[in-house]
Amino acid sequence: MNIYLTIILSFILVVSGYNQSCKKKYNEKLEKSSKLIDCGANYTIEKLESGKCIVKRYFPENKQITHLATYISNESKVLHGLYEEKWDDGTTVTSGYFENNLKVGLWRENVNQTGFYNQGVKHGAWKTYKNDTLLIEVSNYVNGELHGEQIKLDSVGNVKIKEEFNNGKLISTTIDTTKILIDLMPKFPGCENMNLTVDDFDICSKNKLLEYIYGNLKYPKKSRELEVQGKALAQFVISKDGSVINIKVLNGVDSDIKMLVTSILEKMPKWTPGKKDGKPVNVLYTIPIIFKLTD
């Protein structure tokens, strides 16, 4: 009996001494008004006045907190409160709040993504950054599914790819070819039956487009009388089936010229669609149309 008691007391003394050692090591990392209930070489467990329990794990060499999780109580495995994951240099990888094991509110994930959770699922706009400051992607979620517009931007903030989702399903992709290369540019019809090289086919298609536009261009009477001249910058999307959609005249010179350009583009025949990775894609196309009076 005496031997048994001696073994138990020795064990308690060892555990007690170890706890005091790690408490001293991580004391500066503990929450104010918290009670340390357990600790080890690279972790601490604290109990807050509210009854919540915080578990922290550390990178031993510099005592950097690499993992922090808040639970309803020491006896519970239900996450409820602040949650963080960090690299050993202090960079935040994941950060946000749980309510009854469900992510809620604003979160940071994968180091460079921020957005909102609602009852455990992504909801609303999520943004992706490069080097913490340069916005490179914006995605929209509804009840955990991609829904609506998703855009990818270049280094100066211009949209290079635009995707449309419906309840998680990709509906369309539009690529701005001035920002990103595709395998095959869209082609205006009229050159298909000619025995042309790739480069000559491209030149022929562009010439056919200009022939169509300027062949249908009749200077608006009012614009001519007012001697309106200038450049109308037309922008449109050539869709996956070759039809022309999303027509915009960014600089219409005047309202009559803008209406004329829009009408010409609306009546444009179908193109051969552009391709990327062997698949048809929507392609953003921009063309200047010059309006100049001659004697």
Image (tube, rainbow, N blue to C red):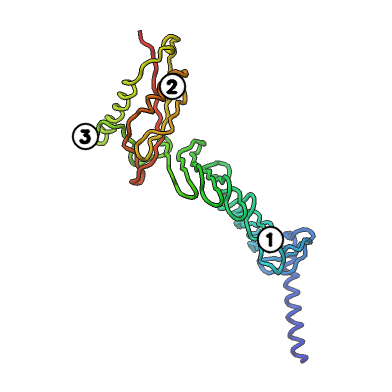
State if disc 2 and disc 1 touch (CB < 8 Å). no
Expressed as whole percent of the image width and height from the top left, the position of residue 218 reads 36, 17
- Crowd band around label 2 with a 10 angstrom C-alpha radius: few (<14), some (14–19), many (20+): few
- Measured in 3D between alpha carbons, the distance from the residue under mark 3 to the one under mark 1, in whole angstroms, is 70 Å
N-terminal-most mark, 1 or 2:
1
- Crowd band around label 3 with a 10 angstrom C-alpha radius: few (<14), some (14–19), many (20+): few
State if disc 2 and disc 3 touch (CB < 8 Å). no
For image coordinates 37% across by 40% down, the residue present is 240
Expressed as whole percent of the image width and height from the top left, the position of residue 171 reads 44, 45
Residue 193's mark?
3
Residue 259's mark?
2
- Crowd band around label 1 with a 10 angstrom C-alpha radius: few (<14), some (14–19), many (20+): many
Give the labeled residue for mark 1. 70
Q: Quadrant of the N terminus?
A: bottom right
- Check disc 3 and report its element: helix, strand or loop: loop
Mark 3 or 1, closer to the camera: 3
Expressed as whole percent of the image width and height from the top left, the position of residue 255 reads 47, 19
